[in-house]
Image: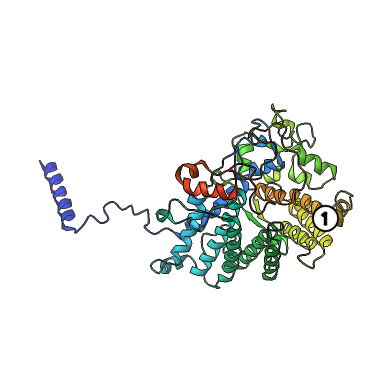
């Protein structure tokens, strides 16, 4: 009886409290789920994707697929991606993930109703600047792979579920503006929290933004050289990387939730899907490249041997070939995002093109030195460098300077699949042979990725418009800058 009375009394008290309220207010509010997103959490989550797109390993992955296209790697068991089986790739996760998160950081630090609270995580200007730089970085990644993509109408949430596709040329023009304005936006105020890439260091973010502009400017070398030259000069004037200390890397951790993807593939899952390709290994052996032991391990027979590229059926087991070097596939091994070697190679090419007054030969040799120091670390020696650049196939030659620069870039950008593929498409070097037997109906190395199928089903009118303008939605319609 007492127990029944207690229950009834409690129920009555709760009912009285509920009915006394003008509405049901906070009854279904989770106190652990804040109504206003945390800008540090949004920023950290977005940056995690910088690591993902630069280190991802697996069939159809953002990083490994283009690394297969340019034959830095080859697949061992499932001989499919090196034969271009996957045609349609999805960018949806980038739009709904890091890009939307970065837009939220910008909005929360801009909106009058939220900017004061957001400033607790760093000055509004500093948070916005970092978000704009990263947003541009992700958008360049997307447009370089697919060409014309949603940009000006994207990231509007429920205001626009069917954004139009912007021309790649227009996107590039806006990226130059965004990076320049963002670098100038840092205000010397409180450091932005949640920055696991550069720890909120404004000076480093400015150099990163300017160096991104430099690389993007050179990408216009054939599509719009006048614009490219002007933007290149402007980026140089604003200050780009000047040493390997400026290199931007994504640092993985010694934990399963944030581990290097090569480690995950080779060790955690013991799949070992990919080894260095014979195209890559054989070239490095041909020119006695001292970086080879720092990029590749020897096979079970104690030899550097690349997996035959695109060979079907499988030519052997993982132990028969050179896997990525142990040093770069540890659980906490970092992946490169943008490096001094890239910047120097861009300057060498710009000098050769007459865009600057720099000495192409000196810049080319400095780039090789920076690359060797980056990859070899304490194993670097001046003697090895001097001997390497003296070889006939490596020494700078004005007659074939672009090919030499591009080939060194191909080596330097090892395991930066998308960037290596971008530069191969733009320059045509090194000269690569496509897989002997392809699975995509074509006969050449892909020049582009086809749009996700969701664009056909959910955004058809805009999809039809972009195909009419850009060309057939396949892997061989070239993007705007790929002339």
Q: Where in the figure is residue 158, as x and y percent of width and height?
A: 40, 54
* Residue extending furthest toward the front: 468
Residue drawn where x is 54% and y is 66% of the image: 129
User: In the rendered view, how is the structure colored?
Assistant: rainbow
Across and down, in percent, residue 346 comes to 74, 59
Seen in the image, is 240 located left or right of residue 15?
Answer: right
Of 450 and 343, the residue lying toward us: 450
Between 183 and 9, the one nearer to me in the picture: 183
Extreme-top residue of the structure:
313
Residue 88 visible to an observer of this rendering: yes
Q: How many marks?
A: 1
Which image quadrant: the N terminus? top left
Residue 253 seen: no
Q: Secondary structure at mark 1?
A: helix
Question: Residue 283 lies in what quarter of the image?
Answer: top right
Query: Residue 336 location in percent, x, y?
Result: 66, 52
Q: Nearer the viewer, residue 471 or 147?
A: 471
Q: Nearer the viewer, residue 213 or 331?
A: 213
**Measured along the vertical axis of the image, is residue 30 above or below residue 353?**
above
Does residue 309 sit above or below 221 in this rendering? above
Residue at the disc numbered 1: 401
Where residue 67 sits, quadrant-wise, is: top right
Given the current orientation, which residue lies at the most extreme bottom position?
Answer: 188
Estimate the x, y position of residue 91 in percent, counting from the top left. 54, 47
Q: Please rate how many residues cluster around mark 1, counting C-alpha atoms within 10 Å: few if below 14, some from 14 to 19, many from 20.
A: some
Q: Is residue 159 left or right of residue 43?
A: left
């Amino acid at each position: 009886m007492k127990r029944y009375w207690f229950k009834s009394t409690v129920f009555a008290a709760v009912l009285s409290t509920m009915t006394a309220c003008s509405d049901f207010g906070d009854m279904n509010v989770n106190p652990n789920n804040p109504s206003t997103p945390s800008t540090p959490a949004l920023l950290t989550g977005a940056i995690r994707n910088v690591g993902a797109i630069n280190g991802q390993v697996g069939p159809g992955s953002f990083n490994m697929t283009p690394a297969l296209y340019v034959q830095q790697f080859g697949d061992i068991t499932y001989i499919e991606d090196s034969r271009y089986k996957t045609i349609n790739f999805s960018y949806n996760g980038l739009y709904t993930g890091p890009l939307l998160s970065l837009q939220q950081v910008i909005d929360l630090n801009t909106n009058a109703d939220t900017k004061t609270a957001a400033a607790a995580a760093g000055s509004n200007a500093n948070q916005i600047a970092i978000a704009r730089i990263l947003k541009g970085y992700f958008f360049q990644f997307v447009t370089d792979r697919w060409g014309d993509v949603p940009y000006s109408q994207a990231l509007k949430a429920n205001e626009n579920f069917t954004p139009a596709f912007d021309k790649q040329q227009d996107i590039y023009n806006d990226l130059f503006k965004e990076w320049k304005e963002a670098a100038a936006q840092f205000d010397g105020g409180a450091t932005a929290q949640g920055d696991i890439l550069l720890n909120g260091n404004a000076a480093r973010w400015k150099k990163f933004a300017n160096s991104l502009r430099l690389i993007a400017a050179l990408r216009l070398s054939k599509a719009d050289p006048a614009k490219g030259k002007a933007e290149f000069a402007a980026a140089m004037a604003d200050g780009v990387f000047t040493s390997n200390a400026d290199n931007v890397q994504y640092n993985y951790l010694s934990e399963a939730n944030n581990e290097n993807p090569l480690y995950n593939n080779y060790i955690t899952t013991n799949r070992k899907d990919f080894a260095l390709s014979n195209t890559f290994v054989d070239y490095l052996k041909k020119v006695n490249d001292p970086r080879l032991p720092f990029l590749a391990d020897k096979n079970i027979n104690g030899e550097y041997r690349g997996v035959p590229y695109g060979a079907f059926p499988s030519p052997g087991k993982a132990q028969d070939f050179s896997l990525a070097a142990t040093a770069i596939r540890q659980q906490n091994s970092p992946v490169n995002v943008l490096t001094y070697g890239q910047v120097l190679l861009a300057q060498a090419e710009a000098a050769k093109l007459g865009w600057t007054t720099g000495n192409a030969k000196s810049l080319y040799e400095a780039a090789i030195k920076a690359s060797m120091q980056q990859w070899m670390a304490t194993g670097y020696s001046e003697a090895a460098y001097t001997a390497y650049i003296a070889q006939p196939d490596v020494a700078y030659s004005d007659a074939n300077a672009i090919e030499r620069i591009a080939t060194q870039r191909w080596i330097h950008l090892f395991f930066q699949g998308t960037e290596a593929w971008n530069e191969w498409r733009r320059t045509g070097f090194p000269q690569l042979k496509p897989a002997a037997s392809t699975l995509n109906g074509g006969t050449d190395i892909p020049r582009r990725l086809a749009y996700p199928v969701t664009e056909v089903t959910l955004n058809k009118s805009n999809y039809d418009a972009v195909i009419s303008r850009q060309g057939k939605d396949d892997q061989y319609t070239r993007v705007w800058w790929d002339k």
